[in-house]
Image (cartoon, grey):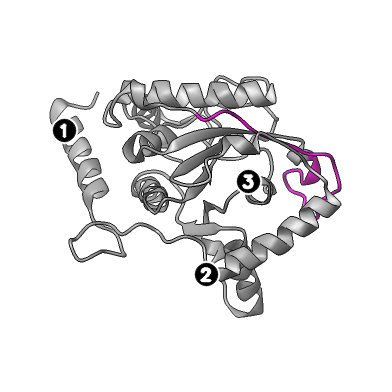
Amino acid sequence: MPTAAYKYAYCRQVTEAANTPAEPIDDEGVEAPTKSPGAVYYLGRTLISVIAKTVFRPTITGRENVPKTGPVILASNHLSFIDSIVIPVSAPRPVQFLAKSHYFTGTGFKGWVSRSFFTAIGAVGVERGAGQAAQNALDQGKRILDGGNAFALYPEGTRSIDGRLYRGRTGIAWLALTTGATVVPVGLIGTQEIQPVGSKVPRVRKVTVKFGEPLDLSHYGAATSGKARRQATDEIMAAIHALTGQELAGTYNEAPPSGTLHKLADKVFPKERL
């Protein structure tokens, strides 16, 4: 069982990591917010939107629920890789989201195509994982929101293989409560049929995108409260469930911890990641 000193040291490390400035830095040493998407994004979004809406003809409802300006988090269920294309082309304003950094680090013509495509759909490269990688992802999301942008993420953390809706990770509540961003739940229906897990070629199938009513989570309290983060996250997931009607899994979407130490850490430390 971790001692009080061990818990204190752990919390201090996490706090110090969270407070460590990340590039870019402004003149006062404060993290500069991520800028809005540039010309490549707008051009790519326009072209992809025309193609997607012509071929797939998605049913989109609730676009008026997305604030036209200011920081907003689009919190969605996650069924397919193509979700990260469906949301940006369906939303009424530019949307950014986090993607694996290796999509941006390739070389040669293939690397250029990958970078250009993911930049065009609003992706921002980040290392994925737990620990410091998770905190870096949260910090990147915060910089996007601090810039007054729309930021899409999947509280489940990764795609649902069986179609069920999994428990949300509390990183989304940390972002919402820290930045004051409005949270708009998003329900995706049918995207797993367009591009099932393991499929590389999209199929033409019916897809529905539902933007739910905005959520104000400020009444739960400060982002420093674990209880506030958990309750806020649960409200977000309940709103997503109301839009999709998916079966609830009741667990996190990840392999169960193995070994005594991993199981103990899973119980003691919260899952503060995206």
Where residue 122 appears, as percent x and y from the top left, is 56, 58
Q: In this rendering, which labeled residue sits more in front, label 3 or label 1?
A: 3
Where residue 1 appears, as percent x and y from the top left, is 24, 23
Total marks placed: 3
Check if mark 1's residue and mark 2's residue have beta carbons within 8 Å.
no
Instruction: Check disc 1: other Cα within 10 Å, few if <14, some if 14-19, many if 20+.
Output: few
Q: In this rendering, which labeled residue sits more in front, label 1 or label 2?
A: 2
Instruction: Check disc 2: other Cα within 10 Å, few if <14, some if 14-19, many if 20+.
Output: few
Q: Give the range drawn in magenta.
A: 193-214
Check if mark 3's residue and mark 1's residue have beta carbons within 8 Å.
no
Instruction: State the residue position of label 3.
Output: 91
> How far is the residue under mark 3 from the one under mark 2?
28 Å
Residue 7 is drawn in which quadrant?
top left
The amino acid sitting under disc 3 is: Ala
**Residue 210 drawn in magenta:** yes
Q: In the rendered view, does 216 fall on the left or right side of 59? A: left
Q: What label does residue 105 carry, if any?
A: 2
Tell me which residue sits at (38%, 50%) in the image. 133
The amino acid sitting under disc 1 is: Tyr
Sequence-wise first label, 1 or 2? 1
Q: In the rendered view, does 189 fall on the left or right side of 263? A: right
**Residue 218 drawn in magenta:** no
Q: In the rendered view, does 273 fall on the left or right side of 54? A: left
The amino acid sitting under disc 2 is: Thr
Sequence-wise first label, 3 or 2? 3
Instruction: State the residue position of label 1.
Output: 8
